[in-house]
Amino acid sequence: MEIEILYEDKSLVVCKKPSGVPSQPDPSGQPDMLSALSERYKNISLVHRLDTPTGGVMVFGLVPKATAKLCALVQDHEKFVKEYLAVVSKPPAEPRGQMRDYLYHDKRTNKAFPTDGARKGSKEAILDYRVLSTAENGHTLVLVRLHTGRTHQIRVQFASRGMPLIGDGKYGSREKCPYIGLWAYRLTFPHPVLQKEISISAAPDMEMAPWCEFTQDLI
């Protein structure tokens, strides 16, 4: 499996995960990111994950000290900033805004859903979004910034408001796509060793649905 490297130094590597590839070994036995990168980098470690259907920017640690600092940073969503592109079935009522919910993750079904308030086992989920473009068929490209990192958070929060991500049958989409309309577009974080900010972005494959509807609209 060929993986595009976006940035690397002695402490970390940032790469572009293809949609449909697991972040690490799982029961499916499919080729995964961590195993593939381990062939090139001797001591590489997983820092965070992306859902298998979701492609985009990922960072991995190359030395234990940097890995530990990165893993701690990931928990601070104001310092380790994650921005996603999503294609939803229709435009939100407002061109920009914030979504706040309490989400419960059912591990048995690996599905999350909103709850009425902070019930036992639920966790608060917060994101900001901004509409970038709306196609003639209503499909809408949005830029999302996460303030929390809950399981399937973006997918659930938009679907619960009647705007499932295109191709996401798990959360109500009836439209077929090779992969769901979700892409980890940009990571911004302080380098764990060097005194500088790292900001790396990568666009999805614009020839693939649903991204091909917005070839002129990516930032």
Image: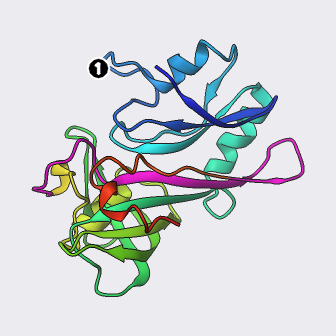
Across and down, in percent, residue 184 comes to 48, 51
Of 29 and 78, the residue lying toward us: 29
Other-residue count near label 1 (Cα within 10 Å), few / some / many at <14 / 14–19 / ≥20: few
Residue at (29% x, 80% y) in the render: 92
Residue 121 in view in this figure: no
198 in magenta: yes
Query: Residue 128's x, y, as percent?
Result: 47, 73
Image position of 125 (left or right of 170): right
Question: Residue 189 lies in what quarter of the image?
Answer: bottom right
Rendering coords of residue 70 (x, y %): 70, 42
Q: Is residue 8 above or below residue 44?
A: below
Q: Is residue 109 left or right of residue 2?
A: left
Above or below — where is 175 with respect to 5? Answer: below
Amino acid type, mark 1: Ser
The x and y percentages for residue 183 are 42, 51
Residue 63 is left or right of residue 161, and the answer is right
Picture residue at 48% right of the left edge, 55% below the top: 149
159 or 68: which is nearer to us?
Answer: 159
Residue 100 visible, this orientation: yes
Residue at 40% of width from left, 18% of height from top?
31
Please state the extent of the stretch shown in magenta in the rendering.
173-199
Residue under pointer 1: 28
Q: Secondary structure at mark 1?
A: loop
Left or right of 158 on screen, residue 70: right
